[in-house]
Image (cartoon, grey):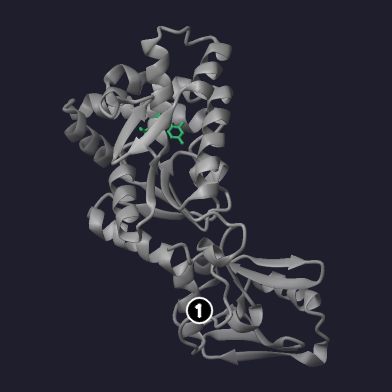
């Protein structure tokens, strides 16, 4: 998980009552070094450790329960006698610290983007019609990072196959095309070789065939390699289906963008001009294909921030994601 690394001594630890014993053991605490304190709604084990005082809370005041914290993922890692806390949601760190009378961020918290060997990538995944392209572009503009539409890459492979009337059931032919075509992004346009195919890759037949082509392991492998090459040399806001789960699992910020199926169908129908019921039906089929294929299936990364765009403006969502990226040291 790609979260903030925080010393438990600075964060304070919140956990289930059942886990207190093993944390205390991992901290090497004797019974004399610990004391249970009940303070209003708060219940904590105050510990004196070599790294300073650590309070292990099983309940805090301010209505913040363990269930709430657990749902926002603040895993406590216990590794060979060492306890560390890795925090997915910064908001929760703030809430927890506020609940125990501390303000702001832990002083020596390491931002995910500040760690060595981490790609400068905001990975934005999610189903069709969630607003990925518009939001990703807006986030890239705000952060001055390069926007990468990985869906367009899969569409280019499909277009090349269809244009060459290649056998779409022959993995060897498909692989050859996936590996050899030249895909480029320039000034917001998509180029196949030196041809602008931005509109051609959005044609109905390409849209329909792409989920099938994108399911070929040979195609996925070729596209993942291309995407990783790009990530190793630049800073990106990349949208797709498996960017955060497969292509860049160590991206410092992963967002899973979603919206209700009705809203997604409404948006797609505005884009394509099709009727909402037909678009909705096609969307359900694509969702099914995208989320059930064996490789690179659409799923929510464990440490992704889930953002529902159903009743929100693009600016609002883009502002939130850009702020998260800044906080995590990506931009
Ligand atoms: O995001 P889009 O609608 O342009 O994507 C087109 C197709 O490509 C869609 O069916 C899912 C697939 N795709 C994929 O399999 N992996 C990605 N990283 C991006 C898109």
- Give the quarter of the image for residue 218: top right
- Give the quarter of the image for residue 296: top right
Locate residue 21 relative to residue 327 in the image: left or right.
Answer: right
- Which quarter of the rendering shows the N terminus? bottom right
Q: Is residue 61 visible?
A: no
Q: Is residue 234 visible?
A: yes
Residue at point 51%, 32% (across, down): 223
Which residue is more in the foreground, 134 or 305?
134
Residue at point 52%, 85% (across, down): 41
Examine the rendered structure and indicate whether residue 16 appears above or below residue 176. Answer: below
Residue at point 17%, 34% (across, down): 270
Locate residue 143 relative to residue 251 in the image: left or right.
Answer: left
Please, which residue is most extreme toward the front here? 194
In the rendered image, residue 288, in percent from the top left (x then y), is placed at 43, 29
- Which quarter of the rendering shows the C terminus? bottom left
For label 1, the residue is 96
Which residue is more in the foreground, 192 or 28?
192
In the rendered image, residue 192, in percent from the top left (x then y), is placed at 37, 25
Please rate how many residues cluster around mark 1, counting C-alpha atoms within 10 Å: few if below 14, some from 14 to 19, many from 20: many
In the rendered image, residue 237, in percent from the top left (x then y), is placed at 41, 50
In the rendered image, residue 324, in percent from the top left (x then y), is placed at 41, 64
Locate residue 54 relative to residue 195 in the image: left or right.
Answer: right
Examine the rendered structure and indicate whether residue 205 appears above or below residue 326. Answer: above
């Amino acid at each position: 998980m790609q979260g903030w690394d925080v010393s438990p001594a600075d964060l304070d630890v919140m956990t289930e009552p059942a886990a207190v014993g093993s944390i205390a053991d991992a901290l090497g605490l004797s019974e004399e070094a610990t004391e249970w304190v009940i303070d209003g709604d708060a219940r904590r084990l105050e510990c004196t450790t070599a790294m300073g005082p650590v309070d292990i809370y099983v309940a805090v005041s301010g209505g913040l329960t363990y269930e709430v914290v657990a749902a926002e993922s603040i895993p406590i890692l216990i590794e060979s006698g060492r306890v560390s806390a890795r925090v997915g949601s910064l908001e929760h760190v703030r809430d927890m610290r506020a609940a125990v009378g501390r303000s702001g961020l832990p002083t020596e918290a390491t931002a995910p983007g500040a760690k060595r060997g981490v790609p400068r990538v905001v990975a934005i995944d999610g189903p069709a019609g969630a607003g990925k392209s518009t939001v990703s572009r807006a986030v890239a503009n705000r952060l001055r990072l390069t926007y990468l539409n990985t869906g367009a890459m899969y569409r280019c492979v499909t277009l090349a196959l269809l244009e060459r009337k290649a056998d779409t059931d022959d993995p060897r032919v498909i692989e050859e095309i996936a590996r050899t075509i030249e895909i480029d992004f320039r000034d917001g346009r998509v180029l196949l070789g030196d041809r602008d195919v931005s509109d051609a890759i959005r044609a109905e037949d390409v849209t329909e065939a792409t989920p099938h082509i994108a399911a070929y392991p040979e195609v996925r492998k070729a596209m993942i390699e291309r995407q990783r090459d790009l990530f190793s040399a630049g800073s990106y806001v990349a949208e797709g289906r498996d960017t955060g789960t497969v292509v860049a699992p160590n991206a410092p910020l992963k967002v899973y963008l979603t919206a209700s199926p009705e809203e997604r169908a409404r948006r797609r129908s505005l884009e394509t001009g099709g009727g909402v019921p037909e678009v909705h039906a096609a969307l359900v089929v694509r969702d099914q294909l995208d989320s059930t294929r064996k490789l690179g299936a659409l799923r929510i990364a464990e440490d992704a921030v889930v953002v529902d765009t159903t009743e929100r403006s693009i600016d609002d969502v883009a502002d939130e994601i850009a702020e998260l990226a800044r906080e995590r040291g990506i931009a």
